[in-house]
Image (spheres, rainbow, N blue to C red):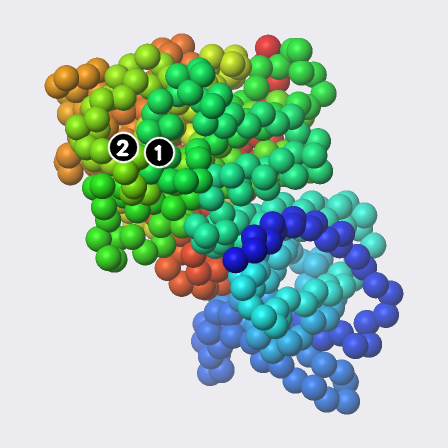
Amino acid sequence: MKIKIPVLEVLEFDLPKEHIEYFDLSIQYSIVDSPIKYSFGEIIFTEGNDGKKLILNAGEKEKLSTDRWRKLGGILAKFLRSHNILKLFLPEKIIIPLEGKELSAFFEGIFLGSYSFEYFKKDSTIEKIYLMVASKDISLKHEIVKIQKICSIVNYARELGQLPGNVINPPALAEICNGLAEKYNLKIKILDEKELEKIGAEAILSVGKGSSAQPKMIVLEYIAKKPNIEKPIVLVGKAITFDTGGYSIKSVDGIKSMKFDKMGGVTVLATILAASLLKIPRNVVGIICAAENMISHEAYRPDDIIKTLSGKTVEILSTDAEGRLVLADGLTYAQRNFQPQCIIDFATLTGGIVTALGKIRAGLFSNNSELSDQLFKSGETTFERLWPMPLDDDYFEFIKGDDADLKNSGGREGHPIMGGIFLKQFIETDVKWAHIDIAGAAISTKAENYQPKGANGFGIRLMLDFLNNQSVEE
Ligand SMILES: [Zn+2]
């Protein structure tokens, strides 16, 4: 199959003048004692002499949280697409009563909910939906344009996530990053297998050895205005473009959806693109550790002992615990080549985090309570929610190697924490670091409200909120 590289297009939001062709939106609320019952998100549409109308039920007013507004936006967008309604007019009576954050969430929902994965469909149904907003408020228009830009990047991350391993492998991802770096004014360095070998990054090399598509470490730099003053915030992402488990092969059911094992790296890529697009005044570095975990005569095996970039040796107990290996080299690279203000890594690291937290919250591990609190808060604000997990040194016992410094699996007990405590061994004591395990939260089981089925782009809005809250540190 010929690989078509996906293109990221950010549509400028436009406000046309005439709206005769448009559906007029109104929002109604459920009244508790009313005999007429509408459920949350129910939509009625009418077409008569007084024009075309859409009535969206927002449920009981008292129950409307910010995220419920986001959900309403998503439900509305999905309805518009499924009914081929491409023009929607939002009158002042909707805009004016809504608080700023409610309105922002509603638009986020519309832009995010309008996404669907059409890459392989012969007759793509993607059509532009025109929104007309009745407001002369310029700052409102700017806010909507900003939201639209952020959401198009989230949607792009979803698209990359949905693309399977025969389209996206490490070299293809590197090529995509190259194109984006040019367009988004980012510095890029791609370490291929030869360079990885030269510096001694044996962990990422071992994971990728079984595949003919060689691993890549992709380093992207977004330099805001004061490159010499500010230390960068470094993001590191796991991008296993497909994970078979290697010789510790996954089961028939377990191997399904392993194309999503690259979502940590995709989150990092999308965040740095958004930081550049929105001109966020923070220096950000993104390190994407890309490899394909396959089986061949070259593949690494259980019992192998490998030397990571840090110099620490690791005994392989399971070739399916590969994410922590590629990240170990990425984290070392980050500390050797940059002076990070802090490091945050994103990874679909463990099935254990899904057992612990389900798909509602991602696991948050950190060696610094201030950083952890800031990330937690951004999670609550954006509704990309996190939950703090422990990293006591007592857990180290389980990953201490017999014949090497470490082993890459600590057994089933405290499974997600084993991943965290392993990564912690690659962080210098004075470096602020957080690890976010998105194995559950980043992949939706079904399409609902503003989420698509599959890769949902979790973590990008979270990181943008976090970056916006950071003050300049020298
Ligand atoms: Zn694995």
Pick the residue in front: 362 or 383.
Answer: 362
- Which residue corresponds to the image point at 26% horizontal and 53% vertical from the top-left? 254
Q: Position of residue 301 (x, y in %)?
A: 22, 33
Q: Which residue is mark 2?
A: 300
Marked residue nearer the N-terminal end (2 or 1): 1
Pick the residue in front: 242 or 296.
Answer: 296
Q: Residue furthest left?
A: 402
Q: Position of residue 55 (x, y in %)?
A: 62, 75
- Which residue corresponds to the image point at 66% horizontal and 11% vertical from the top-left? 228
Q: Which residue is mark 1?
A: 209
Label 2: element kind: loop
Viewport quadrant of the C terminus: top right
- Residue 130 visible in the displayed image: yes
What is the C-alpha distance between the residues marked 2 and 1? 7 Å
The answer to whether the residue labelled 2 contacts the one labelled 1, judged by CB atoms less than 8 Å apart, is yes
Please rate how many residues cluster around mark 2, counting C-alpha atoms within 10 Å: few if below 14, some from 14 to 19, many from 20.
Answer: many
Amino acid type, residue under disc 1 in the picture: Lys
- Left or right: residue 61 compared with residue 330: right
Q: Quadrant of residue 444?
A: bottom left
Pick the residue in front: 398 or 362.
Answer: 398
Q: Residue furthest bottom?
A: 49
- Which residue corresponds to the image point at 49% horizontal and 77% vertical from the top-left? 38
Residue 242: which disc? none
Please rate how many residues cluster around mark 1, counting C-alpha atoms within 10 Å: few if below 14, some from 14 to 19, many from 20.
Answer: many
Amino acid type, residue under disc 2 in the picture: Tyr
- Left or right: residue 433 compared with residue 408: right
Q: Residue furthest right?
A: 17
- Left or right: residue 313 compared with residue 209: left
Q: Residue furthest front?
A: 297
